Structure formats: C-alpha cells, structure tokens
Amino acid sequence: MKKLSYKEKFIQMNREARIICIITAIIIIFWWLMAFGINQDITFFSLPVWFIGACIGTYLLTVILIIFAVKKFFVDFDLDDEITKRTDD
C-alpha cells in the first residue's frame, strides 16, 4: 500500500475519477456506433451484427478498459488520515 499525503490522496482520487469518466464516454460512443452505425442487414449466427457489437462488444470493451485502467492508473492507498489513526489509539 502506498503512503500518500492528504493532498496527494485527493489528487489521485480526482485522477481516477477522470479516468473513469473518460472510459464511460468511450463506452457510450462505442455503443452508439455499434447500435446505430452498422448496417442492419448483416447477420452473424442469425443475430444482427449491430446487436452483437452493441451488447457483447460493449461488455468486452468495458472489461478490457477497466482492467487496463486499474493496472495502469489506479493506486492502492489507505483512505484514513494519519491524524485520525493517532487519536484512536
């Protein structure tokens, strides 16, 4: 677990929140492109390709992006402050 100062904790939390907002925007754009941007007549295993892309593709993209974000950008740190730990003792 990484030791961060009070200010660094908030900077890291804001960074992680921004990354999640960006991932959410990417997922929404991908879903819209798959749902409305693909020709309706193309099928794969008797299912329209837009359905496979919008449902299964969005799920897979979400899992991949979240795993990437957690490994690359997220930091494991304690949310408690050192001051509160000292007063509890």
Image (spheres, grey):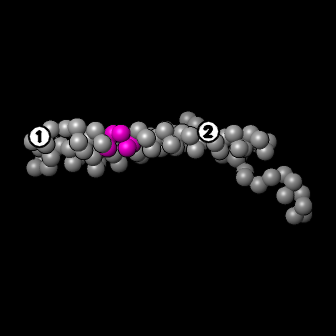
Residue sitting farthest toward the bottom: 88
Instruction: Residue 38: give x, y in percent of width and height.
Output: 19, 38
- Count neighbours of disc 2 (C-alpha within 10 A) and say few if under 14, some if 14 to 19, many if 20 or more: some
Instruction: Residue 39: give x, y in percent of width and height.
Output: 15, 38
Instruction: Residue 24: give x, y in percent of width and height.
Output: 45, 44
Q: Which residue is mark 1?
A: 42
* Amino acid on which disc 2 is placed: Arg
- Labelled disc at residue 15: 2
Query: Disc 1 or 2, which lies upstream in sequence?
Result: 2
Asked if residue 89 lies left or right of residue 56, the reply is right
Which span is picked out in magenta? 27-31
Instruction: Residue 67: give x, y in percent of width and height.
Output: 48, 43
Q: Nearer the viewer, residue 20 or 63?
A: 20
Q: Residue at x 24, y 44 (%)?
A: 35
Element marked by disc 2: helix
- Count neighbours of disc 1 (C-alpha within 10 A) and say few if under 14, some if 14 to 19, many if 20 or more: few
Res. 71 in view: no
* Amino acid on which disc 1 is placed: Ile
Label 1 – label 2 distance at C-alpha = 40 Å
